[in-house]
Amino acid sequence: MAGQADPSPIITIERHILDEQAFHPEATGVLTNILYDLALAGKVIASKTTRAGLAEILGRTEDVNVQGETVLKLDRFADLTVTRLTDHTGRLAGLASEENADFLPIPAPYPMGKYLLVFDPLDGSSNVDFNMPVGTIFGIYKRKREGGPVTEEEFFQPGRNLAAAGYIAYGTSTMFVYTAGHGVHGFTLDPSVGEFLLSHPNIAMPAAKYFSVNLGYQRFWSRGVQRFTEYLQGREGGVQGLSLRYIGTLVSDFHRNLLAGGVFYYPADTKDPRTARGKLRLLYEAAPLAFVAEQAGGYASDGRGPILDVTPSSLHQRTPLFIGNKDLILKVEEFIRGLDG
Ligand code: AHM
Ligand code: MG
């Protein structure tokens, strides 16, 4: 009807990100465009994940196929997709990814921008062979200096400095979820039009329904983490009614708990020296999701305090991660303080 607002407008990700820019009158649109570049990367990676099972038929990965082209493994493909869609735009000054030991400076002759991108291109990649969901995690920081070559040290910023963060979940549908500090918003890819449409505005975590952890490692955990697990199972005054769900892809486990309520944790353990300080990476896994969790009313901790307050001292630093409903994450901090010293 003339003069009346459409009661259910279709909001594309482009329109939504642009509208968000209104919260920042000083904004130049650069951050907006980085998010849009990442959404495009998500579409490209999503189209590839749906064909992942065909790699065996069309050519073995990292091998040369019948057309003489190299067939990349999906995690390598995802890494290159994000890099190639973002490194030449003049928006970024450098990128750090799980796939590369060192950060990537912007290659000459492309112009340098003022943001740093950290990302895990294909989280949960061990699930690819079994047709299980995977994801991409990203965080965007402003660089500490203006101009001049980027140093590794500039990436060592606490999550509190994140300008924006989020993830792309490649599941039964593809979703792009992000925050730029004004709530968490989720978009679902409509494959028929090739566009992300706003499906989950202003996500707020409901009361916990699930807990997600690899219980197979329980005997390797500290007393405090064991006690927390008993608490979640409803033993000795614990919470009642929680159900266990564990996919083994952080993005998917986190995403479910964000929408349905719940906690995910991957504590430090004694099963392997590599997980003595946890398995997950602070910079491009824990910190971006911690920002999303806090923006949705949740909380993320390393068991002692907020993940967002930890300053990394190396690009691939690992951290214990407890993330989800705030009351429960505060509870694990209490158990760890009381039982682990
Ligand atoms: P990845 O980045 O190499 O895929 O490893 C991280 C993944 C997370 O997505 C997931 O939460 C965890 O590893 C599962 O580990 P585990 O198999 O030890 O339970
Ligand atoms: Mg990962």
Image: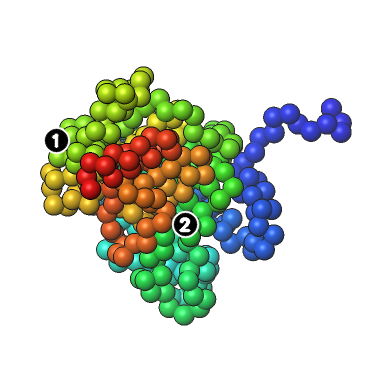
Q: Quadrant of the N terminus?
A: top right
Q: Quadrant of residue 315?
A: bottom left
Specify the color scheme.
rainbow
Q: Which residue was labeled with disc 2?
A: 160
Q: Earlier in the sequence, mark 2 or mark 1?
A: 2
The x and y percentages for residue 84 are 43, 60
Do labels 2 and 1 touch, CB within 8 Å? no
125 and 27: which is toward the camera: 27
Q: Does dot 1 land on a helix, a strand or a loop?
A: helix
Left or right for 5, reference 163: right
- Distance from disc 2 to disc 1, alpha carbons, whole Å, reads 33 Å
123 and 194: which is toward the camera: 123
Left or right for 252, reference 183: left
The x and y percentages for residue 296 are 51, 40
261 and 147: which is toward the camera: 261
**Image mark for residue 219:** 1
- Above or below, 152 against 37 in this view is below
Residue placed at 36% from the left, 19% from the top?
241
- Above or below, 243 against 203 in this view is above
Q: Label 2 is placed on what type of residue?
A: Arg
Residue placed at 48% from the left, 69% from the top?
143
